[in-house]
Amino acid sequence: MVNTAKFIEQAIKEIGDIAAGRGVVMALSGGVDSSVAAALAAKAIGPKLVPIYVDTGLMRKGETERICHLFGDMNLKVVDASVEFLSVLKGITDPEAKRKAIGEQFVRVFEREARQTGAKMLLQGTIYPDRIESEGGIKSHHNVGGMPLHMEFEGVIEPLRDLYKDEVRDVAGALGLPAEIQHRMPFPGPGLAVRILGEVTQEKVDVAREANWIIEDELVEQFRPWQCFAAVVGLGTGVKGDNRVHGWIVAVRAVNSRDGMTADPIHLPYEVLAKIESRITGQIRSVSRVVYDITPKPPATIEYE
């Protein structure tokens, strides 16, 4: 395990040395990784840090409001780029192509914001599993393999690049970050786009967002999973009322893990699963079927894409 006090000291020095007096824009998503990176950068470079939250239109229900509440005292800039992200995803069905399109669009948004502030560096909350999976060909994380080859930035700062998720949580605790942030469930950088199989459309995003909210509402407090979510995996035949319908199939995923490199499905009671199914098909009229994914990692990944 990481020596948190020593790591914090070294990370603050590293950020300051790399930034070398230059302005730094950073991707602040509100998860534990980016929050820890932001806290370290704030100590290292103070007002030279420009934290930016990008609303991609692929976020969880109420996420933008929550981020503004938690980080409003950091002079956080919120950028609504939802139209841009849906536009670059139009017609794309391949998972790797999606991740690369999202990674490039993130960089383009940050480049645009950097031009306005004069910032020359980009700071990210990239952690070690992101690098392993991207470099090992498992999947391209938007902040590693999904980044474009050509960027306007003079450099990218990644102070957490050698840490696992549990180690990042330890650093968050040592920094005094709120428990809500320290123990927050992971959410993928590409957002709901990787919880939608096939082309990302506004309709699918709306279904995924509402289904994810139901899953978290039912499972987070009671079962404390490492991660739980819903994914839109296809279309299927169903019956609603007296009518035969062709509706969305939603897969439910709930796993426990230590660092995200391996994961085991949670054995949820049948009555819990039945309630989840009832809420999803009852509250989201376009959903005709709900299934529960019991596949561990490996052979599956935690997210669907």
Image (cartoon, helix red, strand yellow):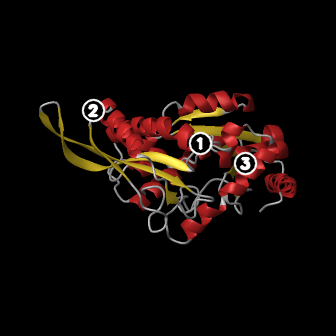
Residue kind at label 3, given as amino acid type: Ala
Residue kind at label 1, given as amino acid type: Arg
Circle nearer the N terminus (1, 3): 3
Relative placement, left or right, of 139 versus 89 is: right
Q: Which residue is mark 2?
A: 285
Across and down, in percent, residue 213 comes to: 46, 35
Q: Give the residue displayed 55% in from the left and 66% down from the top.
A: 133
Q: Give the residue displayed 71% in from the left and 50% down from the top.
A: 169
Marks 1 and 3, how far apart at CA? 21 Å
Marks 1 and 2, how far apart at CA? 39 Å
Across and down, in percent, residue 181 comes to: 67, 40
Q: Which residue is mark 3?
A: 37
The one nearer the camera, 268 or 128, is 268
Density class for disc 1 (Cα within 10 Å; few <14, some 14-19, many ≥20) is few
The one nearer the camera, 74 or 173, is 173
Disc number for residue 112: 1
Circle nearer the N terminus (2, 3): 3
